[in-house]
Image (spheres, rainbow, N blue to C red):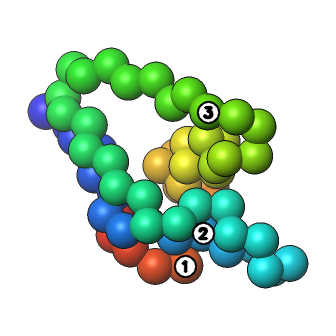
Amino acid sequence: MATVSLKNVKKIYDNKVTAVHDFNLEIADKEFIVLVGPSGCGKSTTLRMIAGLEGYLRGRS
């Protein structure tokens, strides 16, 4: 059984742009989710952090 948990995750890029701010997410085993939002709201950055391709400034995963 696998779960994904993000708690108070924050990501700021080198140019001082905040991509994700205090994001919380709990995904249970076999649960299906969809991230929806406007361009530039942090959807892809969040997925990259979950995949381990991006680091984050603070929080826990």
What whole-number distance in Å separates the C-alpha atoms at marks 2 and 1? 5 Å
54 lies left or right of 28: right
Of the residues shown, which amino acid type is indicated by label 1? Leu
Write down the residue under mark 2.
Answer: 11
**x%, y% of residue 52?**
53, 55
Q: Name the image quarter holding the N terminus.
A: top left
Q: Which mark is residue 38?
A: none
Check if mark 2's residue and mark 1's residue have beta carbons within 8 Å: yes
Q: Name the image quarter holding the C terminus.
A: bottom left
Q: Which mark is nearer the camera, 2 or 3?
A: 3
Q: Tell me what residue is drawn at x 55 percent, y 79 percent.
A: 57
Q: Is residue 13 visible?
A: yes
Check if mark 2's residue and mark 3's residue have beta carbons within 8 Å: no
Q: Residue furthest front?
A: 38
| Mark closest to the chain's N terminus, 3 or 1 | 3
Write down the residue under mark 3.
Answer: 37
Q: Which mark is nearer the camera, 3 or 1?
A: 3
**x%, y% of residue 22?**
44, 67
Q: Is residue 48 visible?
A: no
40 versus 8 height, above or below: above
What whole-number distance in Å separates the C-alpha atoms at marks 2 and 3? 17 Å
